[in-house]
């Protein structure tokens, strides 16, 4: 089992092309931990904004009567991937991992696989 700091470090160093990572509480929109980012990538602002994305998708699923869970969400920009993975196990309810990737340097399938592994090892 890994704590939050170790998990964020692992995501930033082991996921090829990772630019920034955050663990976010989507009930409040607050980042519980961030690593990486720069002046052009404010992870706290992005975390709050992505909370709205999750809430909108959850509302839409409710309106459609979909009885399923969100595993992850992908936002593709011109030069970046923004991957949002909702946590489901061991106290992770209401939390998500947010990973920003350099599109030119990353393998999206591997990033999703590694983020799922990191989630499984994360102890909240």
Image (spheres, helix red, strand yellow):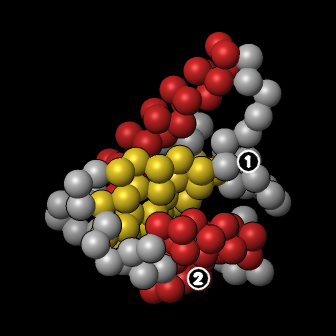
State how far apart marks 1 and 2 are (Cα).
20 Å
**Residue lying farthest bottom?**
13
Quarter the N terminus occupies: bottom right
Secondary structure type for disc 2? helix
Secondary structure type for disc 1? loop
Q: Earlier in the sequence, mark 1 or mark 2?
A: 2
Q: Looking at the rendering, which quadrant does residue 10 occupy?
A: bottom right
**Residue lying farthest left?**
39
Residue 43 visible in the shown view: yes
| 41 or 106: nearer the viewer | 106
Residue 9 visible in the shown view: no
Looking at the image, which residue is at 72% across and 65% down? 124
**Residue 102, position as x, y percentages in the image:** 31, 70
Looking at the image, which residue is at 66% across and 42% down? 70
Residue at mark 1: 93
**Residue 88, position as x, y percentages in the image:** 76, 53
Looking at the image, which residue is at 43% across and 42% down? 50
Q: Is residue 58 left or right of residue 19?
A: right
Above or below residue 109? Residue 60 is: above
Judge the density around disc 1: few (<14), some (14-19), many (≥20) Cα neighbours within 10 Å: few
**Residue 97, position as x, y percentages in the image:** 55, 59
Judge the density around disc 2: few (<14), some (14-19), many (≥20) Cα neighbours within 10 Å: few
| 76 or 34: nearer the viewer | 76
**Residue 89, position as x, y percentages in the image:** 80, 58
Residue at mark 2: 6
Q: Looking at the rendering, which quadrant does residue 113 occupy?
A: bottom right
């Amino acid at each position: 089992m890994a704590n939050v700091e170790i998990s964020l470090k692992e995501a930033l160093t082991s996921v090829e092309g990772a630019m920034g990572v955050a663990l976010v509480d989507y009930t409040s929109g607050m980042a519980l931990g961030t690593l990486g980012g720069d002046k052009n990538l404010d992870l706290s602002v992005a975390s709050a904004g992505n909370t709205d994305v999750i809430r909108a998708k959850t509302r839409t699923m409710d309106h459609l009567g979909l009885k399923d869970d969100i595993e992850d969400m992908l936002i593709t920009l011109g030069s970046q991937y923004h991957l949002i993975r909702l946590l489901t196990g061991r106290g992770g309810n209401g939390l998500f991992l947010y990973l920003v990737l350099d599109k030119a340097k990353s393998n999206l399938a591997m990033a999703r696989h590694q983020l799922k592994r990191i989630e499984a090892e994360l102890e909240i």
